[in-house]
Image (cartoon, grey):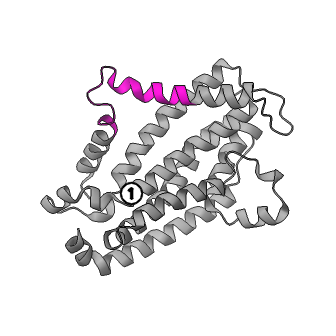
Amino acid sequence: MNFNLIIDLAKRDFTERYSGSALGFVWSFIYPLINILIYMIIFGNLMGARLPGMSSMWGYGIYLISGLVPWTAFANTVTRSSTVYLDKKNIISKIHLELPTLPLFIVLSETITFVVTLIVFLGILLITGYTFSPYLLFIPVIYLIQQIFAYALGFFLAMIVVFLKDLREVVTIGFQIWFWFTPIVYVFEILPSLAQQILFWNPALAFISAYHDIFILQKMPSFIYLSLVLIMSCILIILDYGIFKKLEKDIRDFI
């Protein structure tokens, strides 16, 4: 595995978003700051949105952002990884890369964005007088499980998209639907029992609920549920590598 190349690609991917601008890297803090303030003020204050059992006027804003930030990292990782072989075909044609490792630079790049956004979010929470709990220390573990799943899914889709390019649009639409089947803008407990039983099979529920447990309920997240997602991800990665071994020559030819 060429770690140096992966790290270099991740750095370029992150920095190129703001290349040519006067403020450069500072924009990576400004964008999440503005978005978080909008959600906090509009949903938490002006719209008077409240969570059941939570009196703080910032409650719903915190609930929304604590789910939206990790979801964005997860969705971006998968959707961007699904087209990584087509997007980087110039590099693949010039350098012999281990293709299974290529999506890792997207995982790293989105992780940088996640960390920056999380720092901004925590800073705003500090200003609002939010009481931090020690369960925040579990965020790296939850995020790691989430991104392992994202890599497994993105790697699988990347191989398929090489042969079915229209699948790129299907993936984008699919994630829009998946978003609304995940309790990010609504509370899971208010759903009818049948809907809850259906959504329980949504693997994204495991990590989104974990963030909500930490930021809203301030309790230990369910690592049993997260462990199931991790096991499923590991199985999918093994299947990915098996499929790749059979299709590697065709994948490189189609690229």
Q: Is residue 148 left or right of residue 105?
A: right
Could you tell me which residue is drawn at 44 percent across and 43 percent down? 111
Tell whether position 18 is magenta: yes
| Secondary structure mostly taken by the magenta-highlighted segment of the chain | helix
Regarding residue 133, the answer to whether it shows in the image is: no
State the extent of the magenta-drawn residues as a range.
14-35
Regarding residue 169, the answer to whether it shows in the image is: yes
Q: Nearer the viewer, residue 2 or 113?
A: 113
Q: Is residue 245 left or right of residue 127?
A: left
State the image coordinates of residue 17 (x, y, percent, origin top left): 33, 36
State the image coordinates of residue 106 (x, y, percent, origin top left): 37, 50
Name the residue type under label 1: Ser
What residue does disc 1 label? 81
Could you tell me which residue is drawn at 39 percent across and 46 percent down? 108
* Image position of 104 with respect to 32: above or below: below
Label 1: which secondary element: helix
In the figure, residue 11 lies in which quadrant? top left
Tell whether position 61 is magenta: no
